[in-house]
Every structure is written in C-alpha cells, then in structure tokens.
Amino acid sequence: MKVVAVIPARWASVRFPGKPLALLAGKPVIVHVCQQTQKSKHVQRIIVATDDQRIVDAVTAAGFDARLTRADHVNGTSRIAEVAATLNADIIVNVQGDEPRIEPELIDLAIEALMKAGKSVPVSTVASPFMPGEDANDPNLVKVAVGAHGRALYFSRSCIPFHRVGATIAVEPLKHVGLYVYRREFLSIFVALAPTPLELTEQLEQLRILENGHSIAVAIGNARFHGVDTPQQLEKLEARSSQ
C-alpha cells in the first residue's frame, strides 16, 4: 500500500496568524511537523497543503514537498482532499499542521489500525488516556467512546462516559487525538457529505462520518503533547522542550 501524509497548513488562523511559520527551537512549526511525520515507518511521502506561498517556500527550503491549494476551503479536510485527488496513493494520513511534537508512533498506530480493519472501514484515528494535569471536562479536549471491536461509538466535548455516583467505574475517558487516516477514495465522499446535526451541535467534523453510517477504527496510544493554538501555547511548548 502506498501511504502519503498530507499536512494542511493555512496562514490566516484567527487566534494565531502565521502560526505555521512561527519558530520553535529555531525552526518553523510546520517544518517540525514534517520532520516528526518523516519518522513514521509507514509514511512514504509527505506533502504540505497550504494556501500561502510563504509556507510553500519555507517547507520546500527545508527539503519537503508543498502544494499551493485553493484559498476557499472551509477546513483542512477539504484542503487535503484537493491534493489527495491528484495522488496515486491508497492511504492518506492527515497530520495536523499545528502538531510540532506529534509522536510518530501514533501515526503508525493509526495507519496500522486502518490496515487491520478491512476495506469496509474507511477511516482510522487515535485515542489516548488523559495525561496528568489534563481535565476530562475541558471542552477543548475532545473525548471518544470506543466499542469492543475498536470502533468509535461517539465523539464529544462533554466527558464521556459519564460516571454516575455509585456506579462501578469500568471505563475511563479517552482523549481524542486529531490525527486521521483515510482510504483515499473515501475523502472525496466525505467532503461531499452535508454537515450533520450532531456535527453542528458539537462542532466536531468527524461526527459526520458516524452519522452517515461509516465506521472509524480507533487505535489507543499515549499522546503526551497538544497542538499549538495560541502564541502562549507555543511559548509553553518552547519552555518544555528546553527542559
């Protein structure tokens, strides 16, 4: 199977304009993402999909491939689908462009989960136990409930499962890691689907997949780092990296 990672990166982030080119340990964030993805044992090619020539220039200067996409994409998945449609690949890995410390092992776990799941499953992702100091009630940390066969039952910003007073705690909450692996042909199907009620309520795009009757395989790993949403988070990551 040919596996290609496509990393979406846009300049005009509301909370952090120019985030892909912000420096972490002297290198642009997007270059860190490429370098971490390069450590995957399954990814054979890496492409950054972006709407800004400055990002293209920085990525290519670091020795990686970049594609300039349309500027009107509503989200990263749509941007990835534009690039994926031009590729001779079986599997497309969506690594978020603001995850400079993404663990290569998580990428491999997600790819392997899709390979093992069979062709009836078009998507895989990763979940992780919560790390010390993380709050499962934080709506910015998305939770996922996983069934006995390793398929996602639901994603929520609320804490799931709810622990009722007096009930036996048989399942601890799992944190969703925003890493997706797609069968290439499914990407065009996904982006053509209309937004769904649960997706709009939770503001979680992956619910569109479940609401339309498709399965998502979930690999369990240990995610120790978050993505970077603000300059303050980048400063904290810089400090943590220098320790």
Image (cartoon, rainbow, N blue to C red):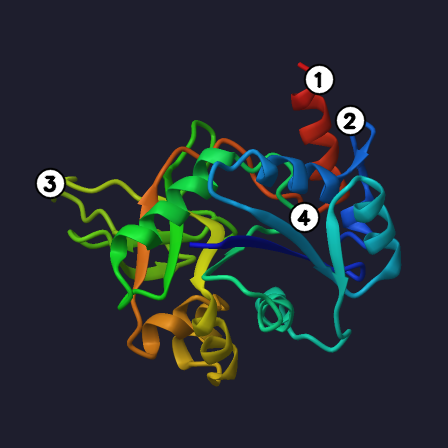
Q: Which residue is drawn at 65% across and 22% down?
A: 240
Residue 151 as seen in the image, left or right of residue 130: left
User: If you read the primary sequence from the N terminus, does the residue marked by circle 4 or circle 1 appear first?
Assistant: 4
What amino acid is labelled 4 in the image?
Answer: Asp
What amino acid is labelled 1 in the image?
Answer: Ser
Which numbered circle lies on residue 229?
4
User: If you read the primary sequence from the N terminus, does the residue marked by circle 3 or circle 2 appear first?
Assistant: 2
Can the viewer see residue 14? Answer: no
User: If you read the primary sequence from the N terminus, does the residue marked by circle 1 or circle 3 appear first?
Assistant: 3
| 191 vs 116: above or below | below
Residue 120 position, x and y percent, is 26, 68
Return the residue at label 3.
Answer: 168
**Are dots 2 and 1 in contact, CB under 8 Å?**
yes
| 122 vs 95: above or below | below
User: If you read the primary sequence from the N terminus, does the residue marked by circle 2 or circle 1 appear first?
Assistant: 2
Q: How crowded is mark 3: few (under 14 residues within 10 Å), some or many (20 or more)?
A: few
Return the residue at label 2.
Answer: 25
Image quadrant where one finds the N terminus: bottom left
Which numbered circle lies on residue 242?
1
Q: How far apart, in angstroms, are the residues tagged by discs 3 and 2? A: 46 Å
Residue 172 as seen in the image, left or right of residue 107: left
Q: Residue at x 32, y 52 (%)?
A: 115
What amino acid is labelled 3 in the image?
Answer: Thr
Q: Is mark 4 on a helix, strand or loop?
A: loop
Residue 233 as seen in the image, left or right of residue 78: right
